[in-house]
Image (cartoon, grey):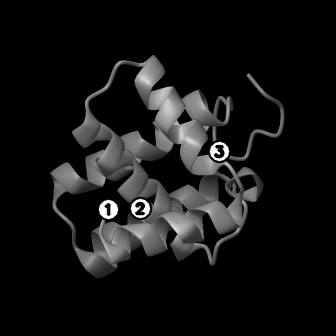
Amino acid sequence: MDAVTHGCHRALEQSQPGLIGRVKSAIREQDLHQRAEQTYLHWITRFVLFHDLKDPESLAGEDRQQFLTYLSDRIQVSRARLNQASQALTFFYQDVLGKTEIGDTAAA
């Protein structure tokens, strides 16, 4: 793991301790490849950093949309990368946090 990745993981853990382990566990339960793990962790980390390390459980659907709009309009990521980010966040909220949608306070 390089220094940048380690720093990002540390930041993600700051927002919610144990979060990286939960993400990795959910990825393995879904039998996804290691590359998917890296990609999902990348986008989840960027999402949390974009929102100043807020606990992801406190973020709502508009926060997700704000991040995706930022990626699309300001950063101008490709459609494929935007889809990756969206899929990673959907996976994160449904499979890791057990929510049907971002901002849903009750577990599914």
- Image spot of residue 18 (x, y percent): 67, 48
Which residue is at a point 52% across and 74% down the rendered structure image?
50
Q: Which mark is residue 83?
A: none
**Tag 3 or tag 1, which sits nearer the N-term?**
1
Q: Which residue is mark 1?
A: 1
Front residue of 68 and 52: 52
Which residue is at a point 22% across and 55% down the rendered structure image?
81
Q: Quadrant of residue 79?
A: bottom left
Q: Is residue 65 left or right of residue 42?
A: right
Q: In the image, what residue type sits under mark 3?
A: Ile
Q: Which residue is mark 2?
A: 68
- Image spot of residue 10 (x, y percent): 55, 68
**Tag 2 or tag 1, which sits nearer the N-term?**
1
Q: In the image, what residue type sits under mark 1?
A: Met
How far apart marks 2 and 3 lie (CA) works out to 13 Å
Q: Secondary structure at mark 1?
A: loop
Question: From the viewer's perspective, is residue 80 above or below residue 12?
Answer: above
Q: Quadrant of the C terminus?
A: top right
Which residue is at a point 31% across and 49% down the rendered structure image?
38
Question: From the viewer's perspective, is residue 52 above or below residue 98?
Answer: below
Q: Which residue is mark 3?
A: 102
Badge 1: how crowded within 10 Å, few (<14), some, or many (20+)? few
C-beta proximity under 8 Å, tags 1 and 3: no
Question: From the viewer's perspective, is residue 71 above or below residue 41?
Answer: below
Q: Secondary structure at mark 3?
A: loop
Badge 2: how crowded within 10 Å, few (<14), some, or many (20+)? many
